[in-house]
């Protein structure tokens, strides 16, 4: 997918790093950095003179005698998130510690902030709606730039991702077939975004753009329309079972909602939100699923409101993947709807099976 030359110079809400003093065994990133791409040309022809890519890493890369990277793992975040959503006890503390499945002493783990997200270049940095209108193809291409040019990684043992990162994982195994051994897409579908999913995204975006206070992206404070977008985001990502369990009274439910919206209005930017949701506009890996050579273990949860199992799409599409397997996690007291994607305590055994299969075949 090397569409252009590059020049030198990385849905969880409010993701934050947790460096708790009372968790000495909790693995922290061993690296953090920025990589600047000059004169990047986006899919639609727009350019950005200086584009910053931010990233976190665990471990160090290893190479075989031919110079091929043998231990690199790329983990991709969801819409509105960042690499920091994986730097938490319930993720890093379950996967990256000594003896764990992705032991940072063995693997080189890369957690990028995608363009438009985290500490990477985004509309809220100053360009507002004049920022280039990136799409998923641009995002994946920039991940490839980060790996190959900044981190000198020329092969991936594993690519995995949650929600938007799940969709990016499908694109990786199609666009870079010789680059990736294994993939673990979590919480998405390998088809065009349509039906209710697309409608929800459009409603969230139009809540912002139809608000006169948005002012074509030149607002002085976050427009009230962002509140409606966050309300849609809450519905998309939540689990009815857990919401009823945690907020069983009207008072508790109302208090949670108001706190959620107040925090959201402080931490989200309306223009960034629009770009993040709009980036999925032309996603559709379905035509090339039969060409995938990588091993793919594809995981969704039965209480995922965005990707409900009754659609039957995952079961149908995985049959096209030569070395593919689909796992549907049943609803339990531990699942969290769409957010189950960031809880490896629930699905980690399947990652273990994938790594074992890869090592023995």
Image (cartoon, grey):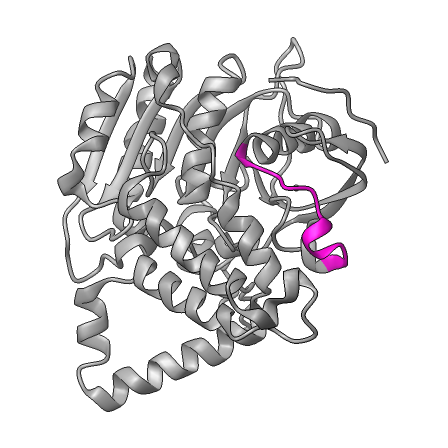
* Image position, residue 281 (x, y; %): 47, 38
Q: Can you say whether 263 is above or below 356 in the image?
A: below
Q: Residue at the far right: name it.
A: 9
Q: Tell me if I can see residue 186 in this picture.
A: yes
Quarter of the rendering containing residue 297? top left
The structure residue drawn at horizontal position 69% and vertical position 60%, both measured from the top left corner, is 124
Side of 188 relative to 21 (left or right):
left
The structure residue drawn at horizontal position 18% and vertical position 29%, both measured from the top left corner, is 315
Quadrant where the N terminus lies?
Answer: top right
The structure residue drawn at horizontal position 77% and vertical position 20%, both measured from the top left corner, is 5
Side of 4 relative to 140 (left or right):
right
Q: Report the front residue among 301 and 33.
A: 301
Quadrant where the C terminus lies?
Answer: top left
Q: Report the front residue among 33 and 204.
A: 204
* Image position, residue 202 (x, y; %): 41, 52
- Which span is picked out in magenta? 125-136
The structure residue drawn at horizontal position 83% and vertical position 31%, both measured from the top left corner, is 8
Q: Tell me if I can see residue 22 in this picture.
A: no
* Image position, residue 16 (x, y; %): 54, 65
Side of 41 relative to 109 (left or right):
right
Side of 307 relative to 83 (left or right):
left
């Amino acid at each position: 997918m090397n569409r252009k030359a590059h020049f030198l110079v990385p849905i969880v809400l409010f993701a934050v790093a947790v460096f708790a003093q009372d968790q000495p065994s909790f693995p922290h990133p061993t690296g953090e950095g920025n990589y600047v791409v000059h004169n990047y040309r986006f899919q639609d022809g727009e350019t950005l003179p200086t584009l910053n890519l931010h990233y976190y890493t665990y471990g160090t890369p290893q190479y075989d005698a031919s110079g091929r990277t043998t231990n690199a793992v790329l983990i991709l975040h969801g819409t509105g998130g960042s690499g920091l959503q994986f730097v938490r006890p319930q993720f890093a503390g379950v996967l990256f510690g000594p003896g764990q499945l992705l032991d940072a002493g063995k693997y080189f783990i890369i957690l990028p902030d995608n363009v438009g997200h985290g500490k990477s270049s985004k509309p809220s940095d100053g360009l507002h709606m004049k920022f280039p209108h990136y799409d998923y193809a641009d995002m994946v291409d920039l991940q490839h730039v980060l790996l190959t040019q900044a981190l000198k990684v020329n092969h991936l043992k594993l690519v995995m991702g949650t929600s938007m990162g799940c969709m990016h994982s499908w694109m990786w195994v199609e666009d870079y077939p010789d680059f990736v051994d294994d993939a673990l897409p979590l919480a998405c579908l390998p088809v065009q975004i349509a039906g209710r999913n697309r409608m929800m995204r459009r409603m969230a975006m139009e809540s912002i753009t139809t608000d006169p206070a948005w002012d074509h992206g030149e607002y002085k404070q976050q427009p009230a329309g962002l509140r409606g977008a966050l309300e849609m985001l809450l519905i998309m990502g939540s689990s009815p079972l857990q919401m009823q369990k945690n907020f069983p009274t009207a008072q508790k439910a109302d208090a949670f909602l108001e706190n959620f919206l107040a925090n959201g209005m402080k931490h989200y930017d309306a223009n960034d939100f629009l770009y993040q949701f709009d980036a999925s506009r032309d996603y559709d890996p379905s035509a090339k699923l039969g060409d995938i050579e990588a091993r793919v273990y594809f995981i969704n949860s039965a209480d995922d409101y965005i990707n409900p199992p009754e659609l039957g799409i995952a079961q149908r599409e995985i049959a096209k993947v030569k070395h593919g397997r689909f796992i549907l996690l049943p609803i339990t007291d531990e699942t969290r709807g769409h957010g189950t994607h960031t809880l490896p305590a629930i699905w980690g055994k399947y990652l273990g099976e994938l790594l074992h299969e890869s090592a023995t075949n």
